[in-house]
Amino acid sequence: MRSQKYAVILHKDTKFKTKHLLEKMEQYNDNIKILVADKEHYSYVDEILATIAAAAKVRGTGIAKRNPGYVKQKMSEGKAVIALDGDKFAGFSYIETWGGKHYVTTSGLIVPEEYRGHGLARRIKHVTFTLARMRWPQAKIFSLTSGAAVMKLNTDHGYVPVTFAQLTDDETFWKGCEGCINQDILKRTDRRYCVCTGMLYDPERPRSVRDADEELSHDPGVEDIIHARFPDGFPED
């Protein structure tokens, strides 16, 4: 069993926008913990990648492939969030910076099927999104997704649909799309569009900030999760 020093139990009084979602979550609140991952979570990497790949296969859509070393690096840098039900894997997402840290992505959001439909993905998104805003407050946070649920989640956090030209021009980011089954579409269109939709949160857009703050106001304790991992502030990166 891992050390509890970074663990924050999900709050029983967490208030989401609908009573239905809150009722669904209550049965899990005593057991599931959401944490900013570290090296102690390396043992979950293979399961995380397998769960992501299986979900993409079921949807029949593409996903940028990541190797175990990449995910371990995100964990060691404090740029990954994991959900655990005791010692059992329950969810994951990670963060990456692009274009000289002017852009940030929260990516790879996955919850195993048995834990879906209870608001856990939303809570993980709250943590990754808040971590990104706290650590890189001037950065634009963007997403490429083909999933309707993720699009809705992004919209609730203040993202708006944008053209690919409004996203980062960092070639390293776009190279990650080469592992996607739809990468030929991206190449044929000269990176103008693909199956995925580009979405962007701009900290300079007041409406986006208001929407994000409203969404996060229903989830007390998110910043506590981040401070537990970084009690002395964020490292240089």
Image (cartoon, rainbow, N blue to C red):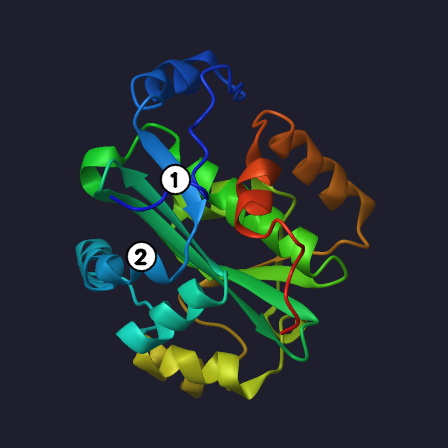
Amino acid found under the numbered disc labelled 2: His
51 displayed left or right of 79 = left
- Where's the C terminus, which quadrant? bottom right
Tell me, for residue 41, which label it has, or none. Answer: 2
Which residue is rendered at x = 41% and y = 63% of the image?
Answer: 75
Q: Residues within 10 Å of mark 1 (few under 14, many from 20)?
A: few
Identify whether 121 is placed above or below 39: above
Tell me, for residue 4, which label it has, or none. Answer: 1
Which residue is rendered at x = 37% and y = 13% of the image?
Answer: 23
Q: For the residue labelled by badge 1, is the local secondary structure a helix, a strand or a loop?
A: loop
Identify whether 114 is placed above or below 201: above
Quadrant of residue 68 within the rendered picture: bottom left
Identify whether 77 is placed above or below 184: above
200 displayed left or right of 176 = right
Identify whether 47 is placed above or below 183: above
5 displayed left or right of 210 = left
Q: Position of residue 43 (x, y in %)?
A: 22, 60
